[in-house]
Image: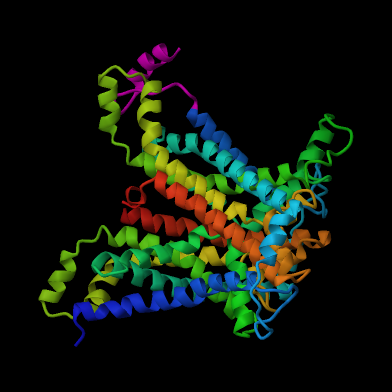
Amino acid sequence: MLSRRGTLPFLVGPPLVWLALFFLLPLFLIAAFSLRAGSGAVGPSEPWAPSAEHYQEVIGTPAFVRLLGVSVLMALGIAGLATVLAYPVAYFLTFRAGSRAALFLTLLLIPFAVSYLLRVMAWKLMLGPEGGINSLLGSLGLTHEPLSLLLYSRPAVIITLVYIWIPFAALPIYAAMQRIGRNHLEAAADLGAGPWARFWRITVPLSMPGAIATFFMVFIPTVGEYVTPALVGGTGGVMYGNIIQGYFTRSANWPLGSAMAMIMLALTLVLVAGALRLIDLRRLSA
Amino acid sequence: MTAIGSERADRRSTIGVGSTRVPLGAFYAGMLILLYLPIGVLFVFSFNAGTTLSFPLKGITLDWYASVFGNAPMLAAARNSFMVGAASATLATVLGCMVAIAVLRFRFRGRGVLLALAGLPLIVPFVVIGVAFFLLFVAVDVPRSLLTVGIGHTVIAVPYATLIVVSRLGGLDPALEDAAMDLGATYPTTLRRVVLPLMAPTLLSAWLTCFIVSFDEIALAIFLVGGDPTFPVFLYGQLRFAQQLPVLIAMAVLLMVGTVGLTVMAMRLRAREA
């Protein structure tokens, strides 16, 4: 008969084996491929010679470094915009919506359940030269020719991604605000703090862990984006992720693509480690 | 302005401390309009007789919806997505549940490591996970197929399943398990007869969340898919054919009704538990 303690290996074993085989091992393989000489679609059976040439190539190619910088800046901007726009929404749901908060939250989240590709396509349709915004502007007589810069540009990528993330961005902030004790606010009011003072000195600091969590939950998927830029960004809106993906599809160069992926992974982990020092995760999950 | 505002707000307020007069309700309403407008545009487009979206519309038609059912490759792709989603959601929920029980009900070395490992896929960009899986299946010489997509989706769904189950199991009194064991049940029996039934709505909610994560996922699937596409991959491949767009959108709208329904269901299940 199995003791309580004897159950533990059966609980720990399967997830551990699964994640080691299908998460840690693959990540290790990127590191291995990024450090081998040669280029193209080099299979595992081909000779493996260690080399840092691919890292040197990435760092030595100004176009790659610039694109990485631009992609990080875009992701920071998109995450920042989504957080700033979601913050008042979360505040409204927590402090103003009253008994209808659950309904309002559901209404906010329904767009997030709509297929990601479908939402990207919606913006493609709206921003296109024959699209909704242009034909609307045209029929109102505001423009005579379609504005071509709307679609296939960096702004198009930014608008689309902010749109995609706003509903989700409100969630961690909302969760943090719900844990703010009303007694804190009442005590501050008793001591003479006005609504703005209470907002800046109680609500903002106490909801900050949620805002930081939101920021990174948008930043991480966005910095590696390649689908949205491919659909609405055109050649001018390409991100670093598009180059990585390209090296595994169109122009196969697995070691170089691996080195680029490793650089992105390292950058993301450094930023997340920094964020974890800022927020106490245990308080978030409590 | 602030001072006057606060005096007035003090009288209105329900929690007794008043608030600023920033029109947050209007902000929320404006945000909802912005969020629903593009989806509404797609919805309109799926009934539009023309193949471009220009106003005024050329006429209303149900042809696109009718032709969905004659499009065999598209229906096959949707079926593939259902299979991959169901299989990966089931496996991810089981794995997430194991992690949650191990971490919350036992003290052992590496407990924190296990929880961190289960959450880690959430903080790695999908393009990196995609590259990683691509190289893994090249290295072990496994041809890419729906099976490899399912394996990938299981990995990215584990964090969601773990977080959802942890949040519920944390609120479940461990004394219930002690009571069952005092009455002679073994621990596995206790889990099966006491813990899992109590968490059934949570497990269903976790399953639905994982299913939707998989069903909608494309960035990872592009790296893992073989000749048989999932629906998002199929959609992505067809997007460059402008004349195909209305049929694709009609199909996507039909699926959207399903995924929105599932999401609302998952949220309700969790709200009831809380």
A276 or A163: which is nearer to us? A276
Answer with left or right where residue B266 lies relative to residue B231: left
Magenta residues, start to end: B1-23
Tell me which residue sits at (40%, 26%) in the image: A200
Q: Residue furthest left?
A: B182
Residue A138, how many percent across, how many down? 84, 35
Quarter of the rendering occupied by the N terminus of chain A: bottom left
Residue B160, how many percent across, how many down? 44, 62
Answer with left or right where residue A176 lies relative to residue A31: left
Tell me which residue sits at (26%, 70%) in the image: B108
Q: Is residue A156 above or below residue B49?
A: above
- Here the colouring is rainbow
Q: Is residue B11 magenta?
A: yes
Q: Residue furthest right?
A: A144
Residue A101, how many percent across, how many down? 41, 41
Residue A5, how many percent across, how many down? 21, 77
Tell me which residue sits at (69%, 74%) in the image: A37
Q: Is residue A107 magenta?
A: no
A79 or B1: which is nearer to us? A79
Residue A227 visible somewhere in the drawing: no
A77 or B78: which is nearer to us? A77
- Label count reads 0
Residue B129 visible somewhere in the drawing: yes
Answer with left or right where residue A232 lies relative to residue B150: right
Q: Is residue A158 above or below residue B180?
A: above
B2 or A197: which is nearer to us? A197
Q: Is residue B57 above or below residue A145?
A: below
